[in-house]
Image (cartoon, rainbow, N blue to C red):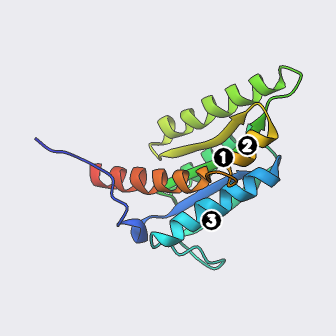
Amino acid sequence: MAIFEGRFTDAQSLRIGVVVARFNDLVTSKLLSGCLDCLSRHGVDATDTSSQLDVAWVPGSFELPLVAQTMARSGSYDVLITLGAVIRGDTPHFDVVVAEASKGVASVARDTAVPVIFGVLTTDTMQQALERAGIKNNLGWSYGLEALEMGSLMKALG
């Protein structure tokens, strides 16, 4: 019997792409900061000149899947992370954006066999989003860990 698991110690061998939504950037920039901190502390070279890590900014969470798909199809990345924040308003727009972003990101991973971490916060209020982006706990860190685990797991599966 073979058991396959991702490892957090293999970070130096991974090529990582991060796609970040600019909409609600008060939240998404904090998620990105937490994510980059996690990756850096696990050995990923997160400097501006790194060839190990790229960050692409998109207008909003709706656009995350298209850029993630383009990056995945390039063959340059072992794992991708999508970061966004969709905060409920008074219209059904929230439901449309969340549904399309989540389905799109899942589709990219299935279609390309490149793991794509879904780091899109979906909250009722800005306060809830800020709590998840650093006031209480920065989920960006968790998304970074998920990327390391999935990237190394996929490499182990060959």
Residue lying at 81% horizontally and 53% vertically, measured from the top left: 25
The three-letter code of the residue at mark 2 reads Ala
Q: Depth check: 140 or 127 in front?
A: 127
Whether 73 is drawn above or below 11: the answer is above
Q: Position of residue 12 (x, y in %)?
A: 42, 71
Q: Residue at x 45, y 73 (%)?
A: 43
Q: Which residue is mark 3?
A: 54
Q: Position of residue 120 (x, y in %)?
A: 66, 41
Please say if 25 is above or below 103.
below
Residue pointed to by mark 1: 132
Circles 2, 1 touching at the beta carbon (< 8 Å): yes
Q: CA distance from mark 1 to mark 3?
A: 23 Å
Q: Is 70 left, or right, of 22 in this rendering?
A: left
In the depicted structure, whether residue 127 falls above or below residue 89: below
Q: Position of residue 102 (x, y in %)?
A: 63, 32
Q: Amino acid at mark 3?
A: Asp
Is there a contact, CB below 8 Å, between mark 1 and mark 3? no
As drawn, the label of residue 89 is none
Residue that mark 2 sits on: 129
**Near-viewer residue (140 or 150):** 140
